[in-house]
Image (tube, rainbow, N blue to C red):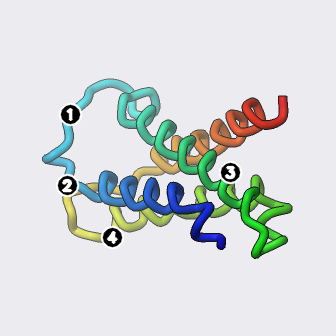
Amino acid sequence: MILRYNLFTILWAAVMLVLTLLPSSSLPSVSGWNFFSIASMAHVFLFCVLTFLMIVGLSKQHSHPYLNRNAIRSSLLISTAFGIFIELLQHFLNIGREGDIFDVLSNTIGCLIGILVFKWIYTW
């Protein structure tokens, strides 16, 4: 049952993985400071949605009680680890992309914003 409630999360993560592993030559170039670039804001948005979807899915499923009770904490951990994994893939695979610590920071900020959005929608 966990897959049933997290289908959108899994699909979103798959799309994110494909998009973040595209060669940089196929992406539009942006100038400006690294942290406040369009690419960083895209990272924030992608991970905000990922974390939000994961919290919703984990809190709805009942086959794994620990994940249900700790949906926010688990989603933050899994989403952040996924972001680090993507950056490591970009760094170590020869695909024309480079892993960046600013991207990890943007991913983590997006995860935290996803938690705030979830709390805003579901608890306030």
Distance between mark 2 and mark 1 Cα atoms: 12 Å
Q: Label for residue 29? A: 1
Q: Is disc 1 placed on a helix, strand or loop?
A: loop
Q: Which residue has dot 2 on it?
A: 23
At x 19% / y 55%, what residue is drawn?
23
- Indicate the quadrant containing the N terminus: top left, top right, bottom left or bottom right: bottom right
Distance between mark 4 and mark 1 Cα atoms: 22 Å
At x 33% / y 24%, what residue is drawn?
32
Query: Comparing marks 4 and 2, which lies closer to the viewer?
Result: 2
Q: Position of residue 4 (x, y in %)?
A: 59, 66
Relative to 30, say whether 64 is above or below: below
Frontmost residue, 29 versus 1: 1
Q: Label for residue 92? A: 4
Q: Tell me the quarter of the picture where residue 92 sits.
A: bottom left
Q: Is disc 2 placed on a helix, strand or loop?
A: loop
CB contact under 8 Å: marks 2 and 1: no
At x 60% / y 40%, what residue is drawn?
109
Q: Which residue has dot 3 on it?
A: 56
Q: Position of residue 85 (x, y in %)?
A: 47, 66
Which sits earlier in the primary sequence, circle 4 or circle 1? 1
Q: Tell me the quarter of the picture where residue 34 sits.
A: top left
Distance between mark 1 and mark 3 Cα atoms: 34 Å
Which sits earlier in the primary sequence, circle 4 or circle 2? 2
